[in-house]
Amino acid sequence: MENICAVFNGEFKDISEIKISPLSRAYTFSDSVYEVIPFYNESIIAFDKHIKRLKRSCSSLNIEADIEKSSKEILDLISSSNLQNGYVYYQISRGVDNLRSHMYSDDLEVESFGYVVEHSFESKNLKVLICDDIRWKRCDIKSTSLLGNVMNMNNAKNKKCDEIIMHKNNEITEGGASNVFFVMNKKICTPSLSSNILPGITRELLIKEIKKNGMLFEEGRYPVENLLGAESIWLTSSTKGLAQVNEIIDQENKIELDNEIFKKCERIFKDAFLGGG
Ligand code: PDD
């Protein structure tokens, strides 16, 4: 992997030149948090919200990071990349242990790592697999411990799916790397925030636009059956924007691909955050 601008512990270099210790707790315990920060036409989408969530993730795990320094590194990565559209991946770990131990020492130096890559924000239709949410009980923290998502998503990949929609005890939670919206009886629905889902920033931005436009909307707790009866389903994330689900495998469903409510949401989101593009 070459020519990817990156930063490691404050030093900017090509990603291929970064060396990490095998005793980094990011490596031994996934003791780290991250953000994916999108930019479009050189303008960052909801930068402050990403920084706020990074700060919250760090404080949830008692990682004492210098968030101001991280913010500056993220901005520098974007400006030095000369890219129009893309995203920054930025990770903060607790640091490097002397020897692997679940209980960390108090004097560890926080370790940070980020890179910037090009990304096109073209809308894509998704084929999804509905599956059991096997993750831990703090999915509200944007931690790099994502094995539940990884296992479920690779199972979906083997079935030629692009994403998953998870449920806990038949209650819809979220996608593998996205939040879920669907339309039921012309009303837009999305699972309420809880410790079972990530408070997605794209989710938050879209909800604000939906409310501003006076569209019928509700946050709640929904069984999988609601999804199977939905007129339209879409997933939201910083890299997907709004991506429509066109197929749920192995399940009967009622998805209409030309759904007017989805099309309006897509339009108001693009107008507000992607310069209408
Ligand atoms: N994932 N839920 C999960 C589990 C996610 O991993 C993500 C984003 C979201 C959407 O959050 P946001 O709108 O703030 O991007 C919801 C990123 C993009 C990733 O892991 O690559």
Image (cartoon, rainbow, N blue to C red):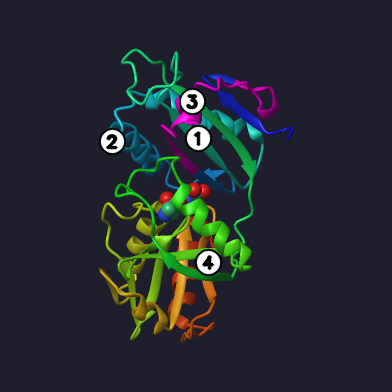
Q: Is residue 72 left or right of residue 193?
A: right
The numbered mark at residue 243 is 4
Which residue is disc 3 drawn over?
Answer: 112
Q: Can you tell which quarter of the image residue 31 is in? A: top left
Q: Give yes or no for residue 18 being in the magenta stretch.
A: yes
- Please state which of residues 33 and 134 is positioned toward the viewer in this rendering: 134
Residue 189, position in %: x, y? 33, 73
Which residue is disc 2 drawn over?
Answer: 60
Query: Is the residue marked by circle 3 packed among few (<14), some (14-19), or many (20+) residues within 10 Å?
Result: many
Residue 50, position in %: x, y? 40, 42
Residue at x 42%, y 20% (from the top left corner) = 110
Are discs 3 and 2 less than 8 Å apart at CB? Answer: no
Residue 238 visible in the snapshot: no
Which residue is disc 1 drawn over?
Answer: 90
Tell me the CA gap for discs 3 and 1. Answer: 7 Å
Q: Amino acid at mark 2?
A: Ser
Query: Is the residue marked by circle 2 packed among few (<14), some (14-19), or many (20+) residues within 10 Å?
Result: some
Tell me the CA gap for discs 1 and 4. Answer: 23 Å
Q: Secondary structure at mark 3?
A: strand
Stretch in magenta: 12-36
Q: Amino acid at mark 4?
A: Ala
Tell me the CA gap for discs 4 and 3. Answer: 31 Å
Q: Amino acid at mark 3?
A: Ser
Whichever of callouts 3 and 1 sits on the residue coming sooner in the sequence is 1
Are discs 3 and 1 less than 8 Å apart at CB? Answer: yes
Ligand 1 within 8 angstroms of badge 3 C-beta: no
